[in-house]
Amino acid sequence: MSSADPLTRGEKRKLTRLRSDLLDWAKENGRTFPWRFADASTYERIVVEVLLQRTTASAVASFYPAFVDRFSSWESLAAASADELEIFLKPLGLWRRRAASLLGLARYAAAVSGEFPRGAASHAEIPAVGQYVSNAISMFQHGEATPLLDVNMARVIERFVRPRKLADIRYDPWLQAAAHWLVRGESPERVNWSVLDFAALICKARTPLCHSCPVSSRCRYFQVEVRSRSRK
Ligand code: SF4
């Protein structure tokens, strides 16, 4: 490990294998959502990431068709009034905050014809764009292998490899490096979706299904927590 590289060689090997195992797992078990269809636009893929914050994918899935029907582009979203958008977003909760975020993002996007600039530093000036949405823009618009790193992806990585040191996942250098390593290479969208599906269906927050988990033999949490508990 170089001093600039937070990951050990062993951690990289574990994460590389995890990527391939989760891609295999997702072929049979991954979830299907309309924003993942091959014909979903870049607009749909980015805007849904704002909708998905602080709510479940199934809640967004039932709301999404009506949303993209009414707001089919950055331009139509940017032209909405705050009142109209808030009423539309009520079923998802946090509607005022979501409406403000979406309007800020849409007005910026419409002004640049939907062509967001490349690079996290240039996203800092875009209203309502934090690290998560910046990564979504980098991946869905520019094809970069960036992680959709939220508490769910963090949970999988930390259980499987080791816990992070800092409370805020955005600033933990080890976790950031691990998440980027996990999604690097081809098809970063598919890898990201596989990890998020695995977090939702198997490596759940409260009750992980460790005994039916396809990667348990290499999982730190399983070896340290689950096995040692069952030996007591
Ligand atoms: S063994 Fe348990 S904790 Fe480890 S990855 Fe699988 S579900 Fe998550």
Image (cartoon, helix red, strand yellow):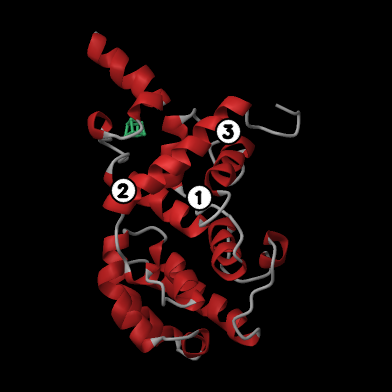
Distance Cα–Cα, label 3 vs label 1? 17 Å
Would you call the spot at circle 3 few (<14 residues within 10 Å), some (14-19), or many (20 or more)? Answer: some
Q: Which residue is mark 3?
A: 12
**Circle 3 SS class:** helix
Q: Which one is in front in this view, the residue at disc 3 or the one at disc 1?
A: 3
How would you rate the neighbour count of disc 1 (Cα within 10 Å): few for under 14, some for 14-19, many for 20 or more? many
Q: Nearer the viewer, residue 125 or 61?
A: 61
Q: Quadrant of the N terminus?
A: top right
Query: In this orientation, does residue 155 appear?
Result: no
Residue in view at x 52 percent, y 89 percent? 75
CA–CA distance in space, label 2 to label 1 = 14 Å
**Mark 2 lies within 8 Å of ligand 1 (Cβ measured):** no
Residue at 45% x, 65% y is 49
Can you tell me which quadrant of the image ligand 1 is in? Answer: top left
In the image, is the residue at mark 3 within 8 Å of ligand 1 by its beta carbon?
Answer: no
Q: Which mark is residue 149?
A: 1
Query: Residue at the spot x=63%, y=31% of the render?
Result: 7
Identity, as a three-letter code, of the amino acid under mark 1: Leu
- Compared across the picture, whether 44 is left or right of 13 comes to left
Q: Amino acid at mark 2?
A: Ala
